[in-house]
Amino acid sequence: MLRLARVNIQKLDALHSRCFAAVASKKAHEKDIAQGPARQNESFMANIFRGSLVPTQVFPYPDVLTSEQKELTASLIDPFERFFAEVNNAARNDENSKIDDNTLTALWELGAFGIQVPSDFGGLGLNNTQYGRLCEIVGANDLGLGITIGAHQSIGFKGILLFGTPEQKEKYLPKVASEKVYAAFALTEPSSGSDAASIKCRAVKSADGKHYVLNGSKIWISNGGMAEIMTVFAQTEQTDKKTGEKKDKVTAFIVERSFGGVTSGPPEKKMGIKASNTAEVYFEDVKIPIENILGEEGEGFKVAMNILNNGRFGMGATLAGTMKECIKKATEHANNRVQFGQKIKNYGAIQEKLAQMNILQYATESMAFAISQNMDSGSQDYHLEAAISKVYASECAWYVCDEAIQILGGMGFMKETGLERVLRDLRIFRIFEGTNDILRLFVALTGIQYAGSHLKEVQRALKKPTANLGFIFKEASKRAASTVGLGGTDLSPYVIDELQPYAKKTAACIDLFGQTVEELLLKYNKNIVHQQFTLSKLANAAIDIYAMIVTQSRASRATRLNLPTANHELSLTKALTLQASDRALMNLRNATSSYHQELNKEMSLIAQSVCENSGVHTSGVIDLN
Amino acid sequence: MARVLVGVKRVIDYAVKVRVKPDKKGVVTQGVKHSMNPFDEIAVEEAVKLKEKKLASEIIAVSVGPAQSQEVIRTALAMGADRGVHVEVSGDEYELLQPVHVSKILAKLALDEKADLVILGKQAIDDDANQTAQMTAAVLDWPQGTFCNKVEKTDAGLTISREIDGGLETIKTKIPAVLSADLRLNTPRYATLPNIMKAKKKPLKKVTAKDLGVDTTPRIEIISVEDPPVRQAGALVADVDALVAKLKEGGHI
Ligand SMILES: Cc1cc2nc3c(=O)[nH]c(=O)nc-3n(C[C@H](O)[C@H](O)[C@H](O)COP(=O)(O)OP(=O)(O)OC[C@H]3O[C@@H](n4cnc5c(N)ncnc54)[C@H](O)[C@@H]3O)c2cc1C
Ligand SMILES: Cc1cc2nc3c(=O)[nH]c(=O)nc-3n(C[C@H](O)[C@H](O)[C@H](O)COP(=O)(O)OP(=O)(O)OC[C@H]3O[C@@H](n4cnc5c(N)ncnc54)[C@H](O)[C@@H]3O)c2cc1C
């Protein structure tokens, strides 16, 4: 324990925030840390980084909707499905690279553009969980259309919902909820993608202080060609209140196309989600009234990150729906196709695929609705889980769609089957709203930083050992238990009997997880931020652990409620745990093994050499040397 | 301007595979998706169309059944009906409720509500009785236009095109009248989400059959409900001769 105290946490904090500007909100973290033990971080995942178990957000599986809300949600499902069956045509949208006007009108009338806007402002006033349920239907039917409505409400005007003043809400929400006015979220620029804090768009305050003048350009903005209202991020000069120093800081603005000086480029030609408009947006001396600042001046980065964090769970729900549809097509085929004298469903190779696809779908859906319900019950501590669910959902959906195509054989490759479009559409989900690589780093580093901040408390306590004896003693025994390998984690109170052996496997992963984080901190100190080979292994273990936890929780609930699907859900959970616990332990061992040190070194060398030579750097087998 | 009464029955959803209960006294309804009888959706759509053409002043959606029947009334309200009446009949009494009871209830409501037109689905997809519209007309002693394919308002009343075996029949009728909707009468709209929200605020009155003076005492007893016989497996024959031989053997030709 004493050796832990030596870790120089302050430096770690600073590095983490600089490196990680793209995803983490520095201010929010500083606040978390400043508040210290006063506010318990309820995140299950954050806490396992420091080796402690905080079960409130995952056990029992959340169930936040009232029966009235459930009934209402149920009544919305049918019309949503009918819109897709009777009005929308995903293949046509893909073919035309746009959604026709009749379909868009029907979509507006359906209420699909203002699902979470309060009814006072003309929206449906649904919560995250209800929104997620509708997202599943969208994901099952048309991802391109999904991005059109998602870019509008999940990010486009979400900032107004989260941070808008009463006047901003009054003015803009009715328009974007039901008056056919499109919204967009404009952050990315040619020179800043993942590193969003480095944007170059600038807004300069007028002499009279009544407005800002915005110049610059954005790229790849969803709905950029049709949005009338945009949440735009730009650098603004801010004076530090303490030092008087002038510094550029990002501010968020609500920009109307009608302000003048806002133009957009032609629709980009893309691999997938073609139904969704993606365009460049240019700002030339755009006069933005001061009332249109969104959130605090200079706090725009926090606004952007909160919007993205808040919307991420929706991707999980959407893609859970996509997977369901892929599975349906694959199963129908497997049930009917005869080869070698048998239905192919009878072959082990096909069974393995179908089972795997269903396991991944179950876990993705379990994550998405655990998070949405945590958010609906007021949690602020869902960012790690939301990032995990985005990474997991987008990768599982890709795998599931790919395997569905495989089960369909040649038919899967044909356009008319509809799966090739889904595969193309899915590819972007691993790239936008935070690339999966960046989100993995975010998960690992945010967790490590949280563990580090806790260690700071240990440090502080050590300065006055007598006053904090109880605290120190508790920490010491906890750490001792986990390092000696006694297995400090006990999940047994939370899962049903039948899952006990599986919960034990997961508990072992959590134990090793805490130990590994500790070991890495000791070994690398602040330099951990540069160990991406290792951080991604840690992130992968975290993802597997979260998948095990949410499925064990959900299957326990299904069993307790005696749902007709309970046995099947138990099977899915057991299979997932057997796979994920094994993989998580491997990743954790690899994170600290010397074997992997060597491997990482070789991989670094290879990459370096390839980059130096701008490509493959080998001598051809039969070319003259 | 006419006041229209439409009947909306809550039935097991058309897409659900219906299962017989182990005791063979009915089918499994617990935990099974229900929705509005598809022919009733067509009836509601027709009423809403009349209202949109200003030929109807008010649409009242009626459902006879257990508490959950209010769900389909809400759907009708979201589609455009103005108010709902739920006639609560539940338990055994509902299991054994027949067109004769429902038609008496609907007739009484038509008179109480001063309706000029009653539009019902031609049949419900659960019991397939195809009797309620006809019986309601009889109880009221109003003219009936069943299996409507097209309904047009004319000076004297309505001109109705009816689906009959192998073709269409066009008739004229005065109002008040009772109509039943066939499949091709229209394509029902789906309720939009904002309208579903608004429908929560539309009035929905609950009454009992007793309030209406209708006796719903069962008149029948269900002896047994059976699954349809399982289709026999087919067989492949080598050629046409073999097929002809098989057909002869089976006495089919
Ligand atoms: C169809 C589409 C729609 C979009 N819609 C919007 C929108 O509506 N609004 C908006 O603002 N933006 C939008 N974007 C932009 C999108 O969010 C960015 O593409 C995304 O953030 C990635 O940025 P980038 O493409 O510049 O890649 P880069 O940031 O240049 O990344 C390139 C690669 O480097 C990796 N990488 C970067 N930094 C690090 C690091 N520190 N460590 C390790 N690896 C790293 C990344 O993971 C990635 O693999 C959209 C993009 C597309 C394609
Ligand atoms: C673009 C394209 C070009 C083509 N070009 C040609 C061509 O030039 N000439 C030509 O002759 N054909 C061609 N083909 C056909 C191609 O070779 C077949 O699609 C391929 O052999 C797979 O057959 P299938 O599509 O009928 O799938 P199936 O054989 O029905 O297989 C469906 C799924 O079942 C699995 N499966 C089948 N049997 C078993 C088993 N016993 N155990 C476990 N799993 C099983 C398969 O692996 C697959 O996942 C082409 C196909 C495409 C799509």
Image (spheres, helix red, strand yellow):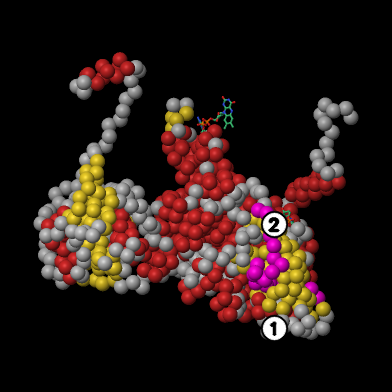
Along the line of sight, the residue nearer the viewer: B143 or A404: B143
**In this rendering, is residue A62 above or below A330?**
below
Label 2 to label 1: alpha-carbon separation: 67 Å
Q: Quadrant of the C terminus of chain A?
A: top right
Q: Quadrant of residue A474?
A: bottom right
Q: Earlier in the sequence, mark 2 or mark 1?
A: 2
Give left or right: position of A494 versus A50.
left
Q: Residue at x 78, y 82 (%)?
A: A207
The quarter of the rendering in which ligand 1 is drawn is bottom right
Q: Which residues are magenta?
A: A247-267
* Mark carried by residue A466: 1
Q: Mark 1, chain letter?
A: A
Residue type at tag 1:
Thr
The answer to whether any part of residue A608 appears in the image is yes
Image x and y of residue A623, in percent: 85, 28
Using a 10 Å C-alpha cutoff, classify the residue at mark 1 as few (fewer than 14 neighbours), some (14 to 19) or many (20 or more). Answer: few
Residue denoted by label 2: A265
Q: Is mark 2 within 8 Å of ligand 1?
A: no
Give left or right: position of A261 versus A227.
right
Q: Residue furthest front?
A: B155
Q: Residue furthest right?
A: A625
Is residue B240 rendered magenta in the image?
no
